[in-house]
Image: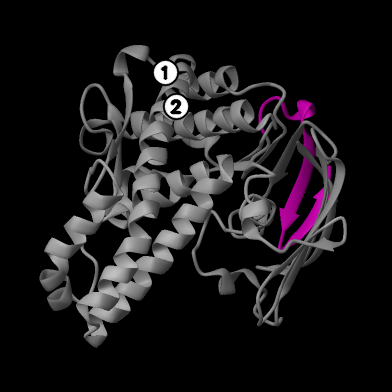
Amino acid sequence: MRFSKVRLQDFRNIEFVELDLSADRIFLCGPNGQGKSNLLEGLGLVTALRSFRTQDLGALRRQESAGYRAFYEIEHESCGRVELEVQASSGPRSVLIDREKVRKMSDYIGRFPVVPLSSGDLMLLRGSPSERRRFMDLTLASLDGAYYLALRNYHKGVAERNRLLRQGGSDGELDAFEAEMAPHAHRLQLHRSAGVKALQVVLERVYRALADHEEGPELSYAANAELEGADHYREMWGRQRERDRIMGATQKGPHRDDFRLGLCLGSAREYGSDGQQRGLIVALRVAQAELFQERLAVKPVLLVDDVLGELDPKRRAGFWKACPGSFQIIASGTVFPEDSEAWKRYSVAAGGFELG
């Protein structure tokens, strides 16, 4: 897929902008803090209505406004030309595809795959397990609606079990919720195990083009509780119940899973150089994009937010070698790239965008 037009209103520092994006390569250039990343963030909403920069969706609206609106024209492999609109105010967000309201998130997520690359991606190495779970959950939910439903239902179950633990719920009540949670927990474990293996295969291929293959990218699933079936989850929560009552929260389950990312020379967080860490994260994002293309039969758009300048020349050249030339790329930076004539260029200042 590819964007052909975007219109943002009251989004971050952008009061209003309408841009023609009908090009394979688009570059947004300007000093930091002017709105380049904000525009890319607005484009990134189309995959799952989530920001790649913050979990606080209230921060997306311009300070003087009650909400924001985002409109996109998209050329899509299976849907043809699509008009997509996102409206957000004080109430629930609404999403319209060709002016028809989307009723179920499970029918929407993953239809319009976009992959962001930003300096914040280093948190996938340096941050908490929750950062890695969010990455993997978005990847797998975009590939399979069944995963999204299992994830949603499991987290609803955990929230209700935690409420019962804090309020002194009876064993019978907890038994009932644990029986509902267990199949979803086991389904998440199976999907995550298979998904990590599939992504690892693509990651190895991408990394060979990006850097020294001898460094060996490694991605693995670290289940908080690796169990063989739903019944085993129910038994585990039964054994943990008194401890969980004391803590007031469910201590074990897929909501505590982690994913290990590193190089064969050791954990990339502990042993990798800054260049190796950045190269590994870029390779992971490109691998995510390629997996989307393979499984969804849709070419994702790459949003490259001022990160290529942070790579050394070898890894920067490797990025272009590893990145499929058929993907639309919308990038940002403080200076235009050396081959700037190959890009459609916008200069950015104070939330305004000027062609050329």
- Tag in front: 2 or 1: 2
> Which mark sits nearer the N-terminus, 2 or 1?
2
Q: Secondary structure beneath disc 1? A: loop
Q: For the residues labelled 2 and 1, say whether their Cβ atoms are less than 8 Å apart.
A: no
Q: Quadrant of residue 211?
A: top left
Q: Which one is nearer the viewer's eye here, 113 or 169?
A: 169
Residue drawn where x is 52% and y is 34% of the image = 288
Q: Is residue 337 visible?
A: yes
Q: Amino acid at mark 2?
A: Ala
Q: Is the N terminus in the top left, top right, bottom left or bottom right quadrant?
A: top right
Residue occupied by mark 1: 211
- Using the image, tell me which numbered label, if any, was put on residue 198: 2
Residue 33 in picture, x, y percent from top left: 59, 60
Q: Residue 29, percent across and down?
A: 69, 45
> How far from the left and from the top, in percent, is residue 140?
50, 42
Nearer the observer, 256 or 58: 256
Say which quadrant the C terminus sits in: top right
Task: Judge whether 231 appears above or below 297 on screen.
Answer: below
- Highlighted magenta segment, given as a residue range: 337-356
The image shows residue 61 at horizontal and vertical percentages of 66, 73
Q: Which mark is residue 129?
A: none
Relative to 2, residue 54 above or below: below
Separation of disc 2 and disc 1 at Cα?
20 Å
Colour style of the rendered protein structure: one colour
